Amino acid sequence: MSAVPQAFRAERIKLTTLRSLWVTPLLSVLLTVGATAAVGAALGDKDRNLTDDPGVGVFYGLNFGQAAMVAFGVLLIGQEFNTRMIDVSRTAVPRLGRLYGAKLALAALIGLGAGAVGTAGAYAGYAATVPADWHGPAFARAATAGVLYPAFLVVFCLGVTALFGNLTAAMGLLTPTVFLLSPLLGGVPGLREVFQFLPDRAGQYALHYADDPHLVYGHWTGLAIMALWTALAAYGGLRAMQRRTK
């Protein structure tokens, strides 16, 4: 049983000793809070898109902060693939499931931490400039989603990277999908019906207060869809790694 915490401890040490890893979650929080506070101060009382749905304003900065979380999820295992250090990790932790599970656990914990700090900071920064109703079920749901969304996103990206077994390929797929294809094509009639089920689109809907008549599911269901994508990516990554090591 002691081997499980030892594997997790090894992954934590890798995180704290590689600057490219531990800086990215901090950057995510700074971007999320900073962009939200800046937009709230500049446009919070002028832009109806922000005032009609407080969730849009509060989590405006998440559109930028999630870039760092995608990079973090990819780098957390992708660096080892590209440098072949994954072979060293496999030697230190021969059981693949234990090694992969430790990486997933670390990714989820860091994602939850970044989500909690980012959500609290975003609400504080936005509330300082824009009056809104910070009570009720919509607030509770959006705040919960704000904490869970980064964790799901990081684990999803880690799983996709493990599935490809290559940092460059994973980054080349995830970056344009999350930041270009999904936001732009998700609003195009005919494509919206398909793109609404992508993990980032579904997860971000849970951050909103207002209902979207164009979506066929509810806010909590959107978060559940993202959780399902995350589980599938994590499982697919494990199966792909197992096949490559046979």
Image: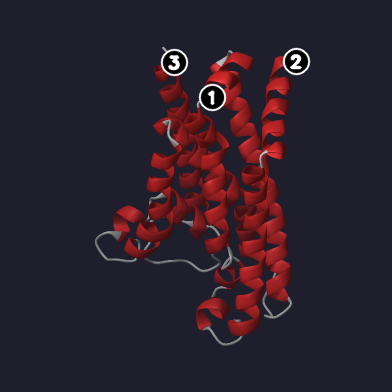
Q: Residue at x 60, y 22 (%)?
A: 99
Measured from the top left, where is residue 157 in percent x and y?
Answer: 49, 42
Residue 136: x and y, percent?
Answer: 67, 65
How far from the left and from the top, in percent, is residue 16?
Answer: 72, 39
Q: Which of marks 2 and 1 is in front?
A: 1
Residue type at mark 3: give it. Answer: Thr
Quarter of the image where one finds residue 160: top left
Per the image, label 1 sits on a secondary structure element best described as helix
Q: Looking at the picture, does residue 140 appear above or below residue 168?
A: below
Write down the residue under mark 1.
86
For marks 3 and 2 on the same chain, the one whose residue lies earlier in the sequence: 2
Please name the residue shown 52% across and 62% down the image. 63
Q: Which residue lies furthest to the bottom in this view?
A: 46
* Pointers 3 and 2 in contact (C-beta within 8 Å): no
Question: Which residue lies under the disc numbered 3?
Answer: 245
- 28 left or right of 63 in image: right
Label 2, label 1: how far apart the Cα atoms are:
22 Å
